[in-house]
Amino acid sequence: MASIQDLSPTKLSSERAPLLPEWQGALSSGRPFAPLTLLIPLAVATRLTSTLPTTTLLGVIQSVICRLWLTSNGNLPPGGEMSKELCAVPEVEKTYAAVISAILIGDGLGAMVACSVISYISSRLGRKPVILGTVAVSFLGYSLMVCSQYLSGWLEASILIASLLLQMVSGTMTMTFIANIYTVDVSSAEDRTPILSAINGWATLGQAVSFAIGGIITTKTDDPLIVYYISIFVLGVIFVYVLAFLPESFSEEKRDELRRQRLAQQNVEASARQNLLSRLISTIAIAFEPLKLLVPTRNTDGRRNWRVVYCAIHIIIAMIADSYAPAALLLLYTTKYSYNPAQTGIVLTILSLSAVFSLTYMIPSLIRVLRPIYCQEDCSPRRSTGLQ
């Protein structure tokens, strides 16, 4: 969904043509560190701050639901202290499961909208302002979460909801998308897959560590706010880091070129936008224009290229399973077995470590091993043609 130039049929002459065009090469050389090296701390830190409070958040939501239920039934103790026995009722558990499910759905929808808006804005202003804006939104979301813990009743729930809404559009999937499009900007098609795998692997390593650390901190201190203070501090540091050190990957020249292409396309389609309603629909649809990449293009032989569509179908199915399985596991452990944040964090850490191994080692290794086999039929003619 990254903002990229139009793929003409001539550029998709074979199955090995890259899905994304080549934008790299505009970053100035002579920097002490490569842009991809500078991207790793951002990827790790943002993943860490997104997942550090995860196990704590589950406890916060459960306590808010329990407090509201006890208040509505007149059973809230005078001091406001709630025991596990008071909250271990079917009504609270059902509401808790429904709220967690709604949050997961909201995360997916929020990330979809956020990625489309980010793609639109970053193609006009650059990647760096979008990164800074997303980090700032996440910072604000965690700040509201801290504020909600000093309130009570429905006011606490309202601020908590506002915090969750901000986290939905600046969470793990959104930051992963930003890191991916930045990587696409500065990497070649040949090296893109192992680089994306490695960067996401390092980010997942930060996630694996943060699950356990966040849960242990909350359990040992019995204070849900400490992990949020840590996350707010890290987000502040990473904001300054991006502002000072991370170079812009989508230069003004690239943005101007993309703008000219879009202007030409708008001039072609201008005849179809005569009335006010058509212009309004067109304006709203701009934010979702990356979805046009799902429309199959034609190869030089006239056949449609369905690779992007197949990739989209695959990622939808994979993300449904990837999102549902851990959530169902967490609901089971926190409701039926009353896991505390430390125990929940260890479970999530074990799940994440397997992903770290796959992303940082298995996938890059498989690509190195399988690429020669894949190239036997397709690459040899291209090499001989080049020699001629």
Image: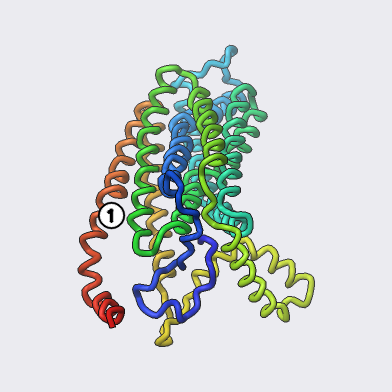
Q: Is residue 43 left or right of residue 269?
A: left
- Seen at 33% across and 35% down, the residue is 349
Task: Farthest residue to the right: give it.
Answer: 276
Rendering coords of residue 11 (x, y %): 45, 77
Amino acid at dot 1: Ile
Few, some or many residues within 10 Å of mark 1 (<14, 14–19, 20+): some
Rendering coords of residue 168 (x, y %): 55, 44
Task: Farthest residue to the bottom: give it.
Answer: 301
- Residue at numbered disc 1: 363
In the rendered image, is residue 153 in sight? yes
Rendering coords of residue 271 (x, y %): 73, 81
Res. 142 image quadrant: top right
Image quadrant holding the C terminus, namely bottom left
Judge whether 160 appears above or below 165 on screen: above
Res. 166 image quadrant: top right
Front in this rendered view, residue 85 or 7: 7
Q: Is residue 36 left or right of residue 150?
A: left
Judge whether 210 appears above or below 222 on screen: below
Judge whether 289 appears above or below 12 on screen: above
Front in this rendered view, residue 295 or 90: 295
Mark 1 residue element:
helix
Task: Farthest residue to the top: give it.
Answer: 79
Q: Is residue 79 left or right of residue 188?
A: right
In the rendered image, is residue 72 in sight? no
- Seen at 38% across and 53% down, the residue is 196
